[in-house]
Amino acid sequence: MKYIKKILLALVGTLVVNFVFSSCGVLDAVKDRYIPYEIVGIQESEVLVKFVFDAPSATEVWLAGSFNNWSQSKSNPAYPAVPLQQNARVVMKLDPKTGYWVATIPLPPGRYQYKYIVDTSNWQEDPNTPEHVDDGFGGHNSIVMVTMPSGAKEETKEEEPEEPAQ
């Protein structure tokens, strides 16, 4: 009988703890953490960076930043149809598995500012990135530092040696 009482007390305690944490949002906060960006590969001399953003009620999300001249106009063609340097819009796609918006773009190593544009007009900083700077409009821009992964070589075009003139 003592053993059954201990099991029941443990179960009740677990239920109470789970209820308290879930009602306070603690479990949701842990569940909703995600990596805001990560390096997923190398393409020629650029680093493939995957951006991830949580906007569950959004119907569309774009990624804008110093890498594409803050492109936000629907009249601008979308990447990858044109290079980012030519003001291409970066349209994020909703990942059905995670419910997060994702986009992977190639960037040369460097420091970039960025924001997300939710439903064509709501500019949002990335709350999960560790570094932000003043955006000049009363808000903040998120920062991504892109570095070439250690061990990765930037590809250089090797020229074939010329044959000596005869």
Image: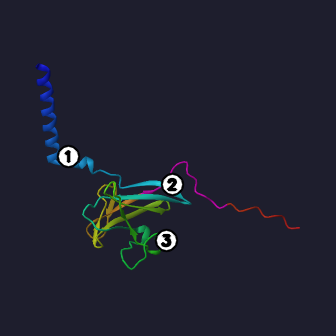
| Mark 2, secondary structure of its residue | loop
Q: Is residue 39 left or right of residue 116?
A: right
Residue 40 badge: none
Residue 26 badge: 1
N-terminal of the pair, mark 2 or mark 3, is 3
Residue 84, horizontal then vertical, whole percent: 46, 70
Picture layout, residue 22 above or below residue 43: above
Query: Looking at the image, how many numbered discs can be counted on the residues?
Result: 3
Q: Residues within 10 Å of mark 3 (few under 14, many from 20)?
A: some
Amino acid residing under circle 2: Met
Residue 156 is inside the magenta segment = yes
Task: Read off the residue under disc 3.
Answer: 83
Amino acid residing under circle 3: Pro
Which of pointers 2 and 1 indicates the residue nearer the eye?
A: 1
Query: In this view of the protein, which residue sits in the foreground, 69 or 42?
Result: 42
N-terminal of the pair, mark 3 or mark 1, is 1
| Mark 1, secondary structure of its residue | helix
Question: Between marks 2 and 3, how big is the CA–CA gap?
Answer: 20 Å
Residue 35, horizontal then vertical, whole percent: 35, 52
Magenta range: 145-157
Which of pointers 2 and 3 indicates the residue nearer the eye?
A: 3
Name the residue at 38% across, 64% down: 113
Residue 5, horizontal then vertical, whole percent: 11, 24
Amino acid residing under circle 1: Val
Q: Quadrant of residue 73?
A: bottom left
Task: Read off the residue under disc 2.
Answer: 148
Query: In this view of the protein, which residue sits in the foreground, 3 or 131?
Result: 3
Main SS type for the magenta part? loop
Name the residue at 14% across, 47% down: 23
